[in-house]
Image: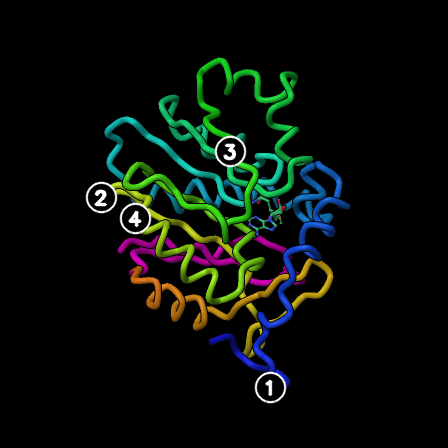
């Protein structure tokens, strides 16, 4: 399923232990989350807000959202909880040191007072099954490269059953600048091509209802694309 470079699929070397060792060695800070590019957070968040607004989702409550591969909750804090005071965000993230930043009573005070921080689930996405039919939006950003193609298809199928009828699954990820997917041995992840993502979405039974390239990022970085998906 994965693209090949040297006759080996790019996702063949994905190793969960290596991924977790890498992320456990990274600072629990915005800079750590963004590989030293903290400065892009603002433009990324604004891009996500603009993309989300164009989806014109119905706002009938309850508005339960999942921030997947959430890290220290950068997206929860700056975007998801700002959509609407009724939004409650469940955090899915395998690295406890990151979610400890969210549980720390000193942090996310306002969001906790308004009841906007839901469950904190320390789990990789390859293990997580969303509760059926309850999510208004499942947001996956800069994390699905840690799953093999097969794991990602299975995970997306579970997301498809996890969203409510008018809900949406969003995947916002780096896009390979080569004809094939690229394996990164530092964090044991795969950067996929746009074609590969579209193929995997189809395999999972999901349709792209909107997609957009993130603008305003430094040209030295991979292109970043957001996809909104529905069964
Ligand atoms: C580049 S950071 C992005 C964090 C957050 N999404 C953001 O944009 O600020 C990648 C995150 O993916 C998490 N991660 C690693 N393996 C994962 C897996 N198997 N499932 C879900 N998340 C994973 C890491 O622990 C880390 O928090």
**Which residue was labeled with disc 4?**
161
Which residue does the image show at 48% across and 53% down from the upper left?
172
Q: How crowded is mark 1: few (under 14 residues within 10 Å), some or many (20 or more)?
A: few
Work out how far the residue at label 3 is from the one at label 2, CA to CA, in angstroms: 23 Å
**Taking 31 as reference, is 59 above or below it?**
above
When asked about the image quadrant of residue 84, the answer is: top left
Task: Find numbered disc 2 in the image and state the secondary structure of the residue it sits on.
Answer: strand
Tag of residue 165: 2
List x then y, in percent, for residue 133: 28, 40
| Whether the residue under disc 2 has CB within 8 Å of ligand 1 | no
x and y percentages locating residue 193 in the rendered image: 50, 70
Q: What element carries label 1?
A: loop
Residue assigned mark 1: 7
| Magenta residues (range) | 207-231
The location of residue 142, given as percent across then percent down, is 56, 52
Q: Which residue is drawn at 43% across and 72% down?
A: 195
Q: How far apart are marks 2 and 1 (CA)?
A: 41 Å
Q: Earlier in the sequence, mark 1 or mark 4?
A: 1
Q: What is the spatial separation of the Cα atoms under label 3 and label 4, in whole angstroms?
A: 22 Å
* Residue under pointer 3: 76
- Residue at screen point 24% across, 36% down: 58
Q: Which residue is drawn at the image coordinates 55% and 48% (left, top)?
A: 124
Q: Determine the CA span between mark 2 and mark 4.
A: 9 Å
Residue 151, compared with residue 135, is above or below; it is below
Q: Earlier in the sequence, mark 3 or mark 4?
A: 3
Instruction: Say which quarter of the image contains residue 227.
Output: bottom left
- Which secondary structure class fits the magenta region best? strand
Tell me the crowding category of disc 4: few under 14, some 14 to 19, or many 20 or more residues within 10 angstroms, Cα based.
Answer: some
Q: Quadrant of the C terminus?
A: bottom left
Q: How far apart are marks 1 and 4 (CA)?
A: 34 Å
Q: Which numbered disc, 3 or 2, marks the residue closer to the eye? A: 2
């Amino acid at each position: 399923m994965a693209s090949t470079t040297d006759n080996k699929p790019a996702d063949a070397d994905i190793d969960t232990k290596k991924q977790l060792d890498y992320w456990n060695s990274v600072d629990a800070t915005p800079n750590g989350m963004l590989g030293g590019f903290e400065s892009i957070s603002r433009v990324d968040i604004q891009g996500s807000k603009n993309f989300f607004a164009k989806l014109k989702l119905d706002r009938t409550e309850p508005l339960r959202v999942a921030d997947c591969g959430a890290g220290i909750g950068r997206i929860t804090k700056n975007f998801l909880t700002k959509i609407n005071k009724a939004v409650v965000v469940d955090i899915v993230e395998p690295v406890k040191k990151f979610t400890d930043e969210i549980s720390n009573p000193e942090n996310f005070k306002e969001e906790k007072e308004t009841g906007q921080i839901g469950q904190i689930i320390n789990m990789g996405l390859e293990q997580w099954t969303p509760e059926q039919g309850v999510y208004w939006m499942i947001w996956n950003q800069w994390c699905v490269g840690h799953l093999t193609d097969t794991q990602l298809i299975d995970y997306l199928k579970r997301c498809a059953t996890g969203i409510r009828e008018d809900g949406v699954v969003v995947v916002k990820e780096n896009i390979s600048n080569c004809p094939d997917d690229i394996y990164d041995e530092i964090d044991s992840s795969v950067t996929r091509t746009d074609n590969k993502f579209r193929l995997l979405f189809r395999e999972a039974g999901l349709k792209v209802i909107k997609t957009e390239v993130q603008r305003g990022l430094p040209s030295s970085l991979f292109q970043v694309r957001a996809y909104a998906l529905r069964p």
